[in-house]
Image (cartoon, rainbow, N blue to C red):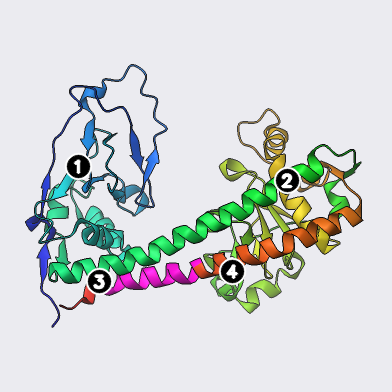
Amino acid sequence: MKLNYKPIGNFIQRVEHRNRDLKVTRLLGLSMTKEFRETTSNVVGTNMSVYRVMSKYQFACDFMSPIRVNKLPVVLKLDDEPNLVSPAYPVFEVKDRNELDPEYLMMWLRRSEFDRYATFKCDAAIRGGYDWEELCETLIPVPHIDKQREIVKEYNTIQNRIKLNEQLIQKLEETAQAIYREWFVEGNWVNVEIKDFGNVVTGKTPSSNNPEDFGNEMPFVTPGDFKNYNKFVLGAERNLSEEGYSKLKNKILPKGSVIVTCIGSDMGKIAVVKNDCITNQQMNSIIVKETFYTDFLYYYLNFVADEIKGIAMGGSTMPMLSKSDFEKIEVMKPEDDILMKFESVMKPMNKLSITYSKENQKLLELKELLLSKLASVEN
């Protein structure tokens, strides 16, 4: 039997716990991914007694964000150590956890449909924001508590597997970086330029006047996609149609190419192409002459990323590295036989990293499917 929806306000209440005694010092912000993040705010000289203290199973949210970013930053605290949040962020909790599981509620608040609803309510509001009253009026299906906990357990199983895979990928990356440093950092090698490793290509964006250039045939990589990558490009949020990529044949990057973001705040992000793709104009890429150049270039460019950013600044407030400047970046190049050996050492680690990354892609799709199905949950 499908459930009737009930207002969230039936189950939650505001919490007003201020840091009056100044005992709590850990200040956290709220991210667009609905997680806590370390704050970047300068709090020197700030009166921290007015900041809100959060405890386990309490929520914090930023009601003013939906109108700016089409998303409501809201976070559920699951650890035992108290933390502070800005006094601008309301804190609330579930009144009775035997009626509504906090993690089940957080699953509902993570849904993209909820963010669209919050944004819609902002657009319709006179004050131009999504507020406490709007949240309380938002409807949620509330099955029996045992069913809620069953759903939460299924969600957490997926989430924990994703985290485990991320940890395994990170361990592989740390091992690869250590091998790179041991083999190459202190070497006395030949000085060459980036262009000596292959053809440098600057990406291009199809004209906005031709929406038919976008479809489902080839990944179109932008700096925003890098949040989904570890070492390898395994897709993109947008894709080109056959018509779209056929117009940009000279921009197609084959497997093994190395992509580098070369402008703005995303400057210096690096990834390796797994399957053919095209990037936008904010990236320069190296189509390598030899496959055994790929891993070396990836780790070399990561190792000297700060130096590249310094070159890109060049007295300007906006870092930018043109194709001509990128091609001239100097590299201490080892002999090819050493690079071949390095490639052979990297191959099994790359294979594992790709396997874990692909599994996470499937798990993320499964997680989103589970969230979307909450709307039709049955007892």
Q: CA distance from mark 2 to mark 3?
A: 44 Å
Residue at 28% over, 38% down? 81
Instruction: Kindly give the residue lying farthest to the bottom in the view shown.
Output: 1
Q: Return the disc, 2 or 4, that comes first in the chain's sequence.
A: 2
Closer to the N terminus: mark 3 or mark 1?
A: 1
- Residue 191 in the image: above or below residue 47: below
- The residue under label 1 is which amino acid type? Val
Q: Amino acid at mark 2?
A: Leu
Mark 2–mark 4 CB contact (< 8 Å): no
Residue occupying the point 34% across, 63% down:
156
Q: CA distance from mark 1 to mark 4?
A: 40 Å
For label 3, the residue is 374
Q: Is residue 273 visible?
A: no
Report, in whole angstroms, how far the alpha carbon at label 4 lies from the one at label 3.
29 Å
The label on residue 355 is: 4
- Whichever of labels 1 and 2 marks the residue nearer the N terminus, that label is 1
Q: Amino acid at mark 4?
A: Thr
| Mark 1 vs 4, N-terminal side | 1
Q: Element type at marker 3?
A: helix
Residue 361 counted in the magenta span: yes
x, y percentage for residue 117? 25, 61
Q: Which residues are magenta?
A: 360-374
Q: Secondary structure at mark 2?
A: helix
Task: Report crowding for label 4: few under 14, some 14 to 19, many 20 or more residues within 10 A (C-alpha).
Answer: some
Q: Secondary structure at mark 4?
A: helix
Tell whether label 3 touches label 2 (CB within 8 Å): no
Q: Which is more N-terminal, label 3 or label 4?
A: 4
Q: Is residue 121 visible?
A: yes
**Which residue position is annotated with label 1?**
91
The numbered mark, 2 or 3, whose residue comes first in the sequence reads: 2
Q: Which residue is mark 2?
A: 301
